[in-house]
């Protein structure tokens, strides 16, 4: 790699999550994950993945020390990626990253320490962005989203939310590339939930190939049937993402294209408000949904 290539360390820490966001990232097609990790993601700019428990070969205290070394040597020069919500109950002991000098290193403490000196923080996945399933009622671990955690701890570091359960790999790689190319997205480039409008600016309902069925009042009664899937629980009328045009698995298909409902996994209402996932939404709350029911 050219000596002129600027290195941007990235620290990826996972808390209350299922590793699905990491799996999705590893499935990126263009650029491939090898390109992302080995080659400059942009001319002259390379992401150096300092810590990622799922991907790295190292383990134990040495890798935790490497994280601290990165933070100390490059204050304000590294990107912190948070995957999963942050359990705060029992002073964070519901989720530990490892042990250092015989003491538990909790997700709570690690996020608080690393976020304050990061260039920016990216909350990857709905669990990190909005709390997701770990924060679901009754939330015994006291799980919080990164945004909520920052507010409670007085952390003002720039934050970008890449929600989804899991997020599309393009949303993750594209956001990192944008930050390296142009810097932190401005207020006019993100929505009120701090998500990039480039990926989360369009309502799925408006771009759904089954929209004509909805307008005609033709509703499916079971998955994979012709008709709009709204009556069997589709959350597309309240979900902002580019799934209908981007598709998943290298552009092969997406949820509604496969005959299943959109479950609204990118929204703060996932999971508590949107469950049961396969039942029609309560029409008494339809004033939030920007559509008219028949």
Image (cartoon, rainbow, N blue to C red):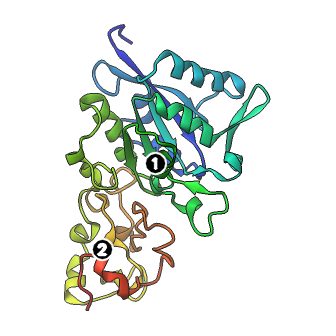
Whether 134 is drawn above or below 44: the answer is below
Which residue appears at 41% of the width and 24% of the height? 76
Question: Given the current orientation, which residue lies at the most extreme top position?
Answer: 3
Which residue appears at 42% of the width and 41% of the height? 122
Q: Where does the C terminus fall, quadrant-wise?
A: bottom left
Q: Where does the N terminus fall, quadrant-wise?
A: top left
Disc 1 designates what residue? Answer: 151
Task: Determine which quarter of the picture holds residue 140.
Answer: bottom right
3D distance between C-alphas at marks 1 and 2: 29 Å
How many numbered discs, if any? 2
Disc 2 designates what residue? Answer: 237
Disc 1 residue crowd, few under 14, some 14–19, many 20+, Cα 10 Å:
few
Where residue 37 sits: x, y (%)?
45, 28
Disc 2 residue crowd, few under 14, some 14–19, many 20+, Cα 10 Å:
many
Out of 115 and 133, give the one closest to the viewer.
115
Say left or right for 16 vs 261.
right
């Amino acid at each position: 790699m050219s000596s002129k290539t600027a290195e941007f360390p990235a620290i990826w820490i996972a808390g209350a999550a299922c590793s699905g966001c990491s799996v999705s990232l590893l499935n990126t097609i263009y650029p491939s994950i090898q390109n992302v990790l080995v080659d400059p993601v942009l001319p002259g700019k390379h992401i150096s993945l300092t810590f990622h428990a799922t991907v790295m070969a190292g383990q134990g205290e040495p890798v935790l020390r490497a994280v601290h070394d990165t933070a100390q040597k490059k204050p304000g020069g590294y990107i912190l990626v948070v995957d999963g919500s942050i359990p705060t109950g029992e002073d964070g002991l519901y989720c530990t990253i490892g042990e250092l000098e015989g003491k538990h290193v909790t997700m709570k403490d690690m996020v608080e320490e690393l976020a304050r000196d990061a260039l920016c923080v990216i909350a990857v996945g709905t669990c990190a962005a909005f709390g997701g399933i770990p924060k679901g009622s009754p939330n015994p671990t006291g799980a919080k989203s990164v945004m909520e955690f920052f507010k409670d701890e007085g952390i003002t570091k720039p934050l970008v939310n890449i929600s989804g359960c899991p997020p599309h790999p393009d949303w993750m790689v594209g956001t990192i590339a944008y930050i390296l190319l142009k810097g932190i997205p401005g207020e006019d480039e993100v929505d009120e939930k701090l998500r990039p409008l480039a990926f989360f600016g369009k309502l799925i309902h408006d771009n759904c190939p089954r929209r004509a069925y909805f307008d005609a009042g033709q509703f499916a009664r079971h998955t994979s049937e012709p008709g709009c899937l709204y009556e069997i629980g589709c959350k597309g009328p309240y979900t902002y993402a580019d799934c209908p045009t981007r598709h998943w698995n290298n552009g092969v298909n997406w949820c509604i294209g496969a005959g299943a409902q959109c479950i609204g996994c990118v929204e703060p209402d996932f999971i508590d408000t949107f469950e049961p996932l396969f039942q029609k939404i309560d029409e008494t709350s339809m004033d939030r949904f920007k559509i008219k029911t028949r």
